[in-house]
Image (tube, rainbow, N blue to C red):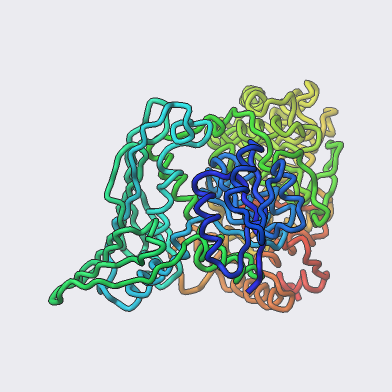
């Protein structure tokens, strides 16, 4: 087991318990502590120093992170500082245990997990109860069928705290409230028990209903939620900072129930007990030996340091927990000031954005745009909040991406607002390529272009978009009217280049002929569906694809840049199965013998190259003999990372033809 020397950031009450428990670990030693208040750090250091093992009081957080004798840090500050300090610690090469919540939301959790993955350091969220033998005993009993088939979980963690509005528990600026302070405990336990029922590590709920009581500052004082899991297991979770509750866990099964009287803070010296009550048997007490939770947590870090995470509290577990807490807060109406779509927030790290040295993004050129355009374009159509958008866009930028595709229609305008606020917050308007779209059905007419573009520019907080796409076509309207409407926006400087999204090649040719004859600018791009899988139908009315041989010939002959949407066939290369017809849209658009043969070949080549079939499908699109800038729509940083793997796959002309059944 690796010996780790620990530093503590934030010497509060929980940090004191952590320091006390470290003395009971054979693999951990406390060597330094840092606080915003130097005197507080000195007092804490004095309390835990001995002649044989002195503890240093660092003058600042950066000073602690710069110490060569600190291998790992325990972060115990207020919630809103966790992401910044975890990122700084990871960048310094330190292993990290961060008090819960790792971030105030799922977006920040993604950022920290990705940083730990990239840097190769250990990271764990501070749910210390997960590392205690009492939790292991609970799981062991449930897996052994002690209560029969698991059916329902009750879990609560609530206390009554009479605190002033400025206290961290009540302050929305500090992410106050019970859901983030203690709600993660019952949620994580419910997911753990439901995972046992499903035969997995943890399980994610498929639905949630919730209610709560908000205090005068707008944070939750008491909240409850009902969770339903795919296995049929249900859970009732409760939390609060304004109401005392019987903090316990009860697992109900077909034969009885198993109760954990003190699930979150089991006694460190006297041991703890589980209470089993099943039909036709006398009640039984299961004794668990004493253990120091934080010491076990530190020992897990030492044991699993090479893996980067421990099974007791994995990265996937933290990500899943954060997603449920996001949903819980949303259900009861808790929104913090820094989460508003117009919030002026810094980068997660507190530093300006920069492309990472290991970025693999390729770039190309589009006529009319005076800057390189990343070969992959980030779709701005599924971001849930400014925090989520900022995390996704920051990560994409750091990977070398600079092109973002959105539309007047998306999210009723929210998507444009999120993109615009992020660009403003980062101060990078000249560095990004903004692709806007308008004139979608039922407003598919030339007159709507100027009106919608004006509204889009206001939402985006800019005076122009780099590329504007007419989102749909109306063949009943003379093509020259659309071209003239776009030419007007070009002359006004509100658009640098334009094209059509879901325009047929025939109408595109007519538009270009009109432009040539009347001194207008031609289409710069076309944005239709294209990919390795041939589309037999399209998912939405008015969509167009260019996957037929004659379409390819036109693209190759004209060299028209293509911005293909759904280039990976809406998940066909990730999850298609002839026997699975549950996704009617996927079946309707892509299920055919030819496409399943393309899938088989993509899987074969993926196995040879050591990548996912989706990476091969994306590499196919990038390897065409005409310029392509595929649109991707990842919802998580993990999805972005796996999507970009396609950039590192170089396909030969023979492989391209073979994948497409042309060889």
Q: Residue at x 70, y 48 (%)?
A: 88
For the C terminus, give its image quadrant. Answer: bottom right
Q: Residue at x 71, y 59 (%)?
A: 118
- The x, y position of residue 383, in whole percent, is 57, 42
Q: Nearer the viewer, residue 263 or 271?
A: 271
Q: Nearer the viewer, residue 76 or 625?
A: 76
Can residue 183 be seen here? yes
In this picture, residue 134 sits left or right of residue 71:
left
For the N terminus, give its image quadrant. Answer: bottom right
In this picture, residue 83 sits left or right of residue 183:
right
Report which quarter residue 457 is drawn in.
top right
- The x, y position of residue 574, in whole percent, is 58, 66
Q: Nearer the viewer, residue 282 or 645?
A: 282
Q: Does 225 sit above or below residue 601?
A: above
Residue that extends furthest to the left in the rendered view of this protein: 280
Can residue 475 be seen here? no
Report which quarter residue 410 is drawn in.
top right
């Amino acid at each position: 087991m690796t010996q780790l020397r620990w530093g503590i950031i934030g010497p509060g009450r929980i940090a004191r318990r952590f320091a006390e428990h470290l003395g009971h670990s054979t693999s951990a030693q406390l060597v330094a502590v840092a606080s915003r208040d130097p005197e507080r750090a000195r007092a804490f250091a004095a309390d835990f120093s001995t002649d044989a093992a002195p503890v240093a009081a660092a003058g600042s957080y950066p000073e602690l992170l710069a110490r060569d004798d600190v291998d790992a840090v325990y972060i115990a500050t207020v919630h809103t500082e966790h992401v910044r300090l975890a990122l700084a610690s990871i960048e310094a090469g330190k292993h990290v245990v961060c008090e819960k919540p790792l971030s105030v939301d799922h977006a920040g959790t993604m950022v920290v997990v990705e940083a730990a993955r990239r840097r190769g350091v250990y990271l764990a969220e501070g749910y210390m109860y997960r590392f205690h033998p009492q939790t292991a005993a609970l799981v062991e009993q449930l897996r052994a069928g002690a209560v029969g088939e698991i059916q329902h979980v009750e879990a609560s963690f609530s206390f009554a705290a009479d605190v002033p509005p400025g206290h961290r528990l009540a302050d929305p600026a500090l992410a106050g409230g019970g859901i983030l302070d203690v709600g993660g405990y019952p949620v994580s336990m419910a997911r753990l028990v439901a995972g046992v029922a499903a035969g997995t590590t943890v399980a994610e709920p498929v639905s949630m209903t919730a209610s709560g009581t908000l205090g005068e500052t707008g944070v939750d004082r008491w909240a409850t939620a009902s969770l339903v899991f795919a296995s049929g297991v249900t859970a009732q979770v409760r939390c609060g900072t304004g109401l005392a509750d019987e903090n316990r866990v009860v697992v109900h099964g077909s034969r009885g129930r198993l109760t954990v009287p003190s699930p979150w803070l089991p006694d460190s010296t006297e041991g703890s007990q589980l209470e089993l009550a099943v039909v036709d048997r006398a009640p039984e007490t299961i004794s668990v030996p004493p253990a120091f939770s934080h010491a076990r947590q530190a020992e897990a870090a030492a044991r699993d340091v090479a893996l980067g995470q421990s099974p007791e509290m994995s990265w996937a577990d933290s990500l899943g927990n954060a997603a449920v807490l996001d949903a819980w807060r949303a259900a009861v109406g808790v929104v913090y000031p820094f989460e508003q779509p117009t919030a002026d927030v810094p980068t997660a790290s507190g530093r300006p954005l920069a492309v990472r040295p290991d970025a693999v993004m390729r770039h190309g050129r589009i006529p009319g745009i005076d800057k390189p355009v990343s070969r992959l374009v980030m779709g701005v159509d599924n971001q849930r909040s400014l925090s989520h958008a900022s995390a996704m866009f920051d990560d994409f930028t750091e990977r070398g991406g600079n092109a973002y595709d959105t539309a007047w229609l998306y999210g009723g305008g929210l998507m444009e607002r999120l993109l615009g606020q992020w660009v403003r917050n980062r101060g990078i308007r000249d560095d990004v390529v903004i692709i806007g779209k308008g004139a979608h059905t039922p407003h598919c007419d030339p007159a709507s272009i100027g009106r919608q573009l004006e509204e889009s520019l206001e939402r985006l907080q800019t005076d122009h978009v780099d590329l504007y796409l007419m989102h749909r076509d109306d063949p009943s309207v003379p093509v020259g009217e659309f071209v003239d409407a776009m030419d007007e926006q070009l002359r006004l400087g509100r658009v640098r280049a334009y094209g059509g999204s879901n325009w047929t090649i025939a109408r595109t040719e007519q538009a270009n002929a009109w432009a040539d004859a009347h001194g207008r600018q031609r289409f710069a791009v076309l944005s239709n569906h294209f990919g390795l899988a041939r589309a037999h139908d399209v998912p939405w009315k008015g969509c167009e694809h260019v996957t037929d041989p004659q379409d390819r010939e036109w693209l190759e002959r004209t060299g028209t840049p293509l911005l293909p949407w759904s280039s990976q066939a809406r998940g066909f290369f990730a999850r298609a199965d002839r026997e699975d017809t549950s996704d009617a849209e996927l079946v309707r658009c892509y299920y055919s013998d030819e496409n399943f043969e393309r899938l088989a070949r993509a899987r074969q080549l993926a196995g040879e190259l050591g990548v996912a079939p989706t990476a091969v499908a994306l590499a196919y699109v990038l390897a065409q003999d005409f310029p392509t800038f595929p649109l991707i729509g990842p919802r998580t940083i993990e999805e972005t990372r796996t999507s970009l793997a396609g950039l590192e796959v170089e396909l030969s002309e023979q492989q391209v033809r073979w994948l497409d059944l042309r060889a």
